[in-house]
């Protein structure tokens, strides 16, 4: 690890190093610091975005918040830990293989959870499903806790180095990895949702499940696919997160999951680009507050800002204000 | 005169309940292949529920739904579509967030053969040329009449043998209604498609259909050839405006 993230998970960026290493005037340092924080914030936000997408997609097709989603993120990290044994560490091929396999495992896990826990409750009250989701979440957390007494140290999957950009901004290879991987996953997701038959069916089910079944769409299959897709993204998020905060434990998903959920709401729940935007924004806000002298109140301030945004845009940044045409 | 044509669809004593509400009280229907049959009745009579029972959207309590000789009453909606039944729901229910083209593509969801999809789409454009001019447009921004055309077009995309239409005239200007009804007859003639038409506008429905059922509070009270129903004084009084 290159020290951009400290062990508490806060982003206490090493801008003092930049201060001493560059002989620029003070205001240039502030500019540097600003951009450094943006980069740190975006790389944290990208991970929130990856998790938020799963919340928002599942909400889109089922109008329900899958509280177990944050634990899929955790399982993603643990799968990464498990698969890393079979591949050379600090290699691009090994790293990508581990990410891919973990995404696969979590996709199946997400589909399994939907099949076993949520599908039998289809048509019953929303509250029942919600309580079941909380149950599934606890089941995952505590089954891991039974086996684990102390946190595991996450391996270094990819080669690490850091780049100093003009102006003294430091960019770690992990951050580059987060950006590149998130971008590729977002592009793939947009492609699936907008240009494939399954993606179009997802949008159809999301708009009107009854009409969707009348054109021959098997809603259950589409819902299952949506869980798989969202869970795979959460797994990728879990691994990327663990590269930055390399101590993994069964409750590691709780806080990032909560924040990602807020990011999804902020972007407009059910809206895919909204979830990505919400995640990035939340990451940046959090990083800036954390880097200021109010860092003790990071989460409080970040959440207050979100509440303020939601007061002015109740349906989220990209959420639709209009009511469905009947 | 004896007719040799077979029934494409038969309902035998179908009962549907919603909790304590008894929406269909033992309905029986017989629809001959190639016919346009209409189901008329007042608000709340159970017309929509009948169509929904046939497409598997609501479970039936008892009775049988026989389609081309097979009981389909336990099948799921998407399996029923696969068997060749298409349902244009009340209120159109086009996918407002999808483009016109995507709506039609979703209509052909179960069709794998691209050539069939293409030719069926051309057919839909030939009956509703307005849709072709708007393929990129988001369906939610279409006018009510255009949405109805799209809903019918979407249903046709599945290449059905049996088409159900739930109040296609609802909320549409009279001139356009006339046009849409002409198209319904055209589809019936050209594609040999059997049609079950639910309408509040009983005059129009009886004009284009061969046989009609009158539904009242979940029961069929009268059934006959449409021409006979049109001259029935009680039907005239209750549904045809005197
Ligand atoms: N999902 C439901 N839950 C409870 N009751 C229902 C449901 N759907 C329909 N009903 C009831 O069943 C009866 C028949 O309704 P249905 O929609 O079939 O009538 P309709 O003949 O189509 O009327 P309209 O001409 O107004 O469309 C009504 O009393 C209605 O309130
Ligand atoms: Mg109705």
Image: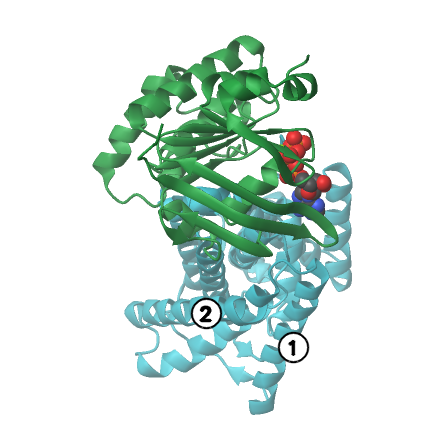
Chain colours: A cyan, B green
Q: Position of residue A248 (x, y in %)?
A: 55, 78
- Label 2: few (<14), some (14–19) or many (≥20) C-alpha neighbours in 10 Å: many
Contact check, label 2 and label 1, Cβ < 8 Å: no
Q: Which mark is residue A138?
A: 1
The furthest residue to the left: B115
The quadrant in which the C terminus of chain A is found is: top right
Give SS at disc 2: helix
Mark closest to the chain's N terminus, 2 or 1: 2
| Of A107 and B227, the residue lying toward us | B227
| Of A302 and A11, the residue lying toward us | A302
Q: Residue at x 34, y 32 (%)?
A: B3
Q: CA distance from mark 2 to mark 1?
A: 17 Å
Q: Position of residue B143 (x, y in %)?
A: 54, 18
Q: Which mark is residue B159?
A: none
Q: Position of residue B29 (x, y in %)?
A: 50, 40
Q: Chain of mark 1?
A: A
| Of A202 and A81, the residue lying toward us | A202
Q: Residue at x 59, y 47 (%)?
A: A270
Q: Is residue B26 left or right of residue A112?
A: right
Q: Is residue A180 visible?
A: yes
Is B139 situated above or below B55? above
Q: Residue at x 41, y 18 (%)?
A: B183
- Label 1: few (<14), some (14–19) or many (≥20) C-alpha neighbours in 10 Å: some
| Of A240 and A185, the residue lying toward us | A185
Q: Is residue A29 visible?
A: no
Same chain under badges 2 and 1? The reply is yes
Q: Chain of mark 2?
A: A
The furthest residue to the top: B175
The furthest residue to the front: B1
Q: Which mark is residue A106?
A: 2
Give SS at disc 1: helix
Is B58 situated above or below A259? above
């Amino acid at each position: 690890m290159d020290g951009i993230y400290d062990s508490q998970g806060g982003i206490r960026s090493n801008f003092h190093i930049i201060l001493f290493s560059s002989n620029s005037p003070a205001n240039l340092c502030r500019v540097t610091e600003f951009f450094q924080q943006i980069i740190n914030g975006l790389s944290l936000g990208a991970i929130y975005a990856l998790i938020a997408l799963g919340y928002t997609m599942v909400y889109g097709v089922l109008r329900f918040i899958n509280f177990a989603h944050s634990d899929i993120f955790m399982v993603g990290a643990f799968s990464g830990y498990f698969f890393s044994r079979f591949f050379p560490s600090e290699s691009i091929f090994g790293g990508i293989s581990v990410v891919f396999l973990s995404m696969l495992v979590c996709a199946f896990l997400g589909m399994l959870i939907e099949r076993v826990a949520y599908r039998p409750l289809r048509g019953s009250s929303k509250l029942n499903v919600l309580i079941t989701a909380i149950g599934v979440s606890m089941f995952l957390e505590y089954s891991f806790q039974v086996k684990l007494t102390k946190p595991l140290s996450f391996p270094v999957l990819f080669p690490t180095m850091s780049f100093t950009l003009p102006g003294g901004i430091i960019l770690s290879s992990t951050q580059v990895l987060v950006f590149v991987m998130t971008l590729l996953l977002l592009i793939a997701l947009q492609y699936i949702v907008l240009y494939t038959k399954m993606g179009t069916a997802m949008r159809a089910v999301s708009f009107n499940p009854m009409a969707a079944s009348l054109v021959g769409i098997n809603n259950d299959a589409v819902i299952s696919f949506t869980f798989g897709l969202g869970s795979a993204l959460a797994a990728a998020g879990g691994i990327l997160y663990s590269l930055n905060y390399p101590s993994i434990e069964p409750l590691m998903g709780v806080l990032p999951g909560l924040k990602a959920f807020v990011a999804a709401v902020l972007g407009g729940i059910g809206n895919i680009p909204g979830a990505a935007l919400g995640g990035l924004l939340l990451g940046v806000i959090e990083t800036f507050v954390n880097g200021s002298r109010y860092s003790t109140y990071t989460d409080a301030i970040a959440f207050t800002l979100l509440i303020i945004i939601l007061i002015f845009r109740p349906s989220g940044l990209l959420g639709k204000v209009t009511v469905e045409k009947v | 005169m004896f007719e040799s044509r077979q029934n494409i669809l038969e309902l035998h004593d179908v009962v549907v309940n919603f909790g304590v509400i008894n929406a269909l009280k033992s309905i029986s229907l017989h629809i001959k292949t190639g016919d346009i049959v209409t189901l008329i009745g007042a608000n709340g009579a159970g017309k929509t529920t009948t169509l929904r029972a046939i497409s598997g959207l609501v479970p039936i309590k008892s009775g049988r739904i026989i389609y081309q000789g097979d009981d389909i009453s336990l099948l799921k909606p998407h399996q029923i579509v696969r068997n060749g039944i298409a349902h244009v729901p009340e209120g159109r229910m086009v996918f407002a967030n999808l483009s016109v083209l995507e709506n039609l593509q979703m209509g052909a969801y179960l069709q794998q053969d691209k050539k069939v999809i293409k030719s069926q789409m051309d057919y839909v454009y030939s009956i509703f040329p307005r849709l072709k001019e708007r393929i990129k447009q988001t369906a939610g921004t279409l006018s009510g009449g255009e949405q109805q055309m799209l809903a019918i077009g979407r249903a046709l995309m599945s290449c059905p043998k049996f088409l159900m239409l739930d109040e296609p005239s609802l909320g549409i200007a009279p001139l356009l209604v006339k046009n849409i009804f002409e198209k319904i007859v055209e589809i019936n003639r050209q594609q040999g498609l059997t049609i079950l038409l639910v309408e509040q506008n009983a005059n129009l429905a009886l004009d284009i259909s061969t046989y009609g059922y009158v539904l009242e509070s979940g029961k069929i009270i009268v059934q006959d050839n449409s021409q006979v129903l049109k001259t029935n004084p009680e039907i005239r009084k209750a549904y045809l405006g005197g």
